[in-house]
Each structure stands twice: as structure tokens, then as C-alpha cells.
Amino acid sequence: MKSSASPRMTQDQKVRLMFVCLGNICRSPLAEAAFRAEVRKAGLSDAFEIASSGTGEWHVGKQADQRMRETAHRYGMSLDDHRAQQFNAGHFADFDHIFVMDKNNLHDVLFLDRKEQHANKVRLFREFDPEPDDYQVPDPYFGGRQGFEIVFSIVQRTATELLDRLIKEYDLKPAAEE
Ligand code: 4NP
């Protein structure tokens, strides 16, 4: 994986990840929670800073979508503490990797990179999906419950694979579950 951060991190440096979708109430909060859960299982919480945001401003300050929260809850994951925030150009400096859910997000995030300095840290999240289909996490917002289930399974398996890849890239040492 190309990275602007050095793969050799000193002990107190964290790998900083930002997950981005449109509203920051469905897909990226789930990606944040799923990745956080994987990190905790691997005993690596201290090695990561994990956040999420949306390219749109409509839902800033709101909780995650009720349907996404219910789906996550069924699989033992809580999104209750999440509050939506909007992605801004300052986040390019604050994060080492920015994983976007679809190609519109990719376009909107790169549009904010006015000097074209940060494109190397912006990737489609599903590049890490073992079954990537069209490399996008489908937007479930205007669909039915089934869409949230599909998003959950895509995000869960991709988060697992992403952590494996980052463990290798940064030479991290997984420990017992925290
Ligand atoms: P998300 O889903 O980008 O996965 O959080 C959406 C949330 C809200 C809207 C669209 C998608 N919206 O149009 O308000």
C-alpha cells in the first residue's frame, strides 16, 4: 500500500485512519466501528487513531442512522456514541490514510485537495475487500433494510482484511484481545 506515513512508526506514533462517506451516518460510522472492533480484538488499540466523516454537511452533529445502528447492534456493535462530522481539507494533514466508500466520495474528497498533495493517501475502502465487486460500498440510505445488511457484510470483511494489510505494512505486533 502506498502511504505518505513512514511504515516504521516509533512507539508513540499512531497510524491515523479516516473513513469517509456522504452523510457520515451510515457507511463510514460502521466502517469506523468495525475497524475499531478488529483493532481491539488484535490488542492494537494504542497503535491506531480512527475517525470517520462525511463529505456533506446535512447531518453534522447527528447520531448514526437508526437502521444502521440497529443492524450494527444485531451483530454486537454499538454506534450509539457516534456524532456526524464533515470532512474538511484540514483532515489531509491529520490522517495518514483516508478510506472512502464510493467514487463520488473519492471525487469530493480529492476536490478539496486543491494543491494535489494528498491524493496518495486517499483510497477506495473496498480495494481491500477480497470480493470487491465495483469497489464501492453501496449507499443504503434510500433503500430498504436489506441494504443495511449488505453494507454490514461488506464493511465487516473489508475491515478485517484492511487491518491485516496495515499490520504487515507497519510491522505491528498483534496481542491478545483487550
Ligand atoms: P452515508 O449514507 O453516506 O452512508 O452516511 C447517506 C446518508 C444520508 C444521505 C445520503 C447517504 N442523505 O442524502 O441525506
Image: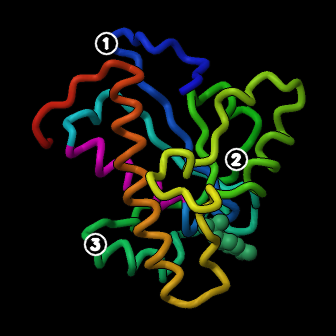
Q: Is residue 81 above or below residue 145?
A: above
The type of residue carrying mark 3 is Tyr
Residue drawn at point x = 48 percent, y = 82 percent: 67
Q: Are the residues tagged 2 and 3 within 8 Å (C-beta)?
A: no
Q: Residues within 10 Å of mark 3 (few under 14, many from 20)?
A: few
Asked if the stretch drawn in magenta spans residue 29, the answer is yes
From the viewer's side, name the closer residue of 98 and 138.
138
> Mark 2 or mark 3, which has the lower sequence index?
3
> In x, y percent, where is residue 43?
19, 36
Disc number placed over residue 87 in the picture, else none: 2
In percent of the image, x 67 and y 84: which residue is there? 142
Q: Residue at x 86, y 42 (%)?
A: 111
Considering every residue shown, the one lying at the far bottom of the view is 144
SS state under label 3: loop
Residue 20 picture location, percent across and down: 62, 51
- Look at the image and say whether residue 140 sits in the magenta stretch: no
Q: Main secondary structure of the magenta part?
A: helix
Q: Which label sits on residue 11?
A: 1
Task: Tell me which amino acid carries mark 2.
Answer: Phe
Furthest residue toward left:
176
The answer to whether 126 is drawn above or below residue 4 in the figure is below
Residue linked to disc 3: 75
Determine whether label 1 and label 2 are within 8 Å by CB. Answer: no
Mark 1 or mark 2: name the one nearer the start of the chain: 1
Q: Which residues are magenta?
A: 28-41
Q: Give the Cα separation between the discs numbered 2 and 3.
A: 27 Å
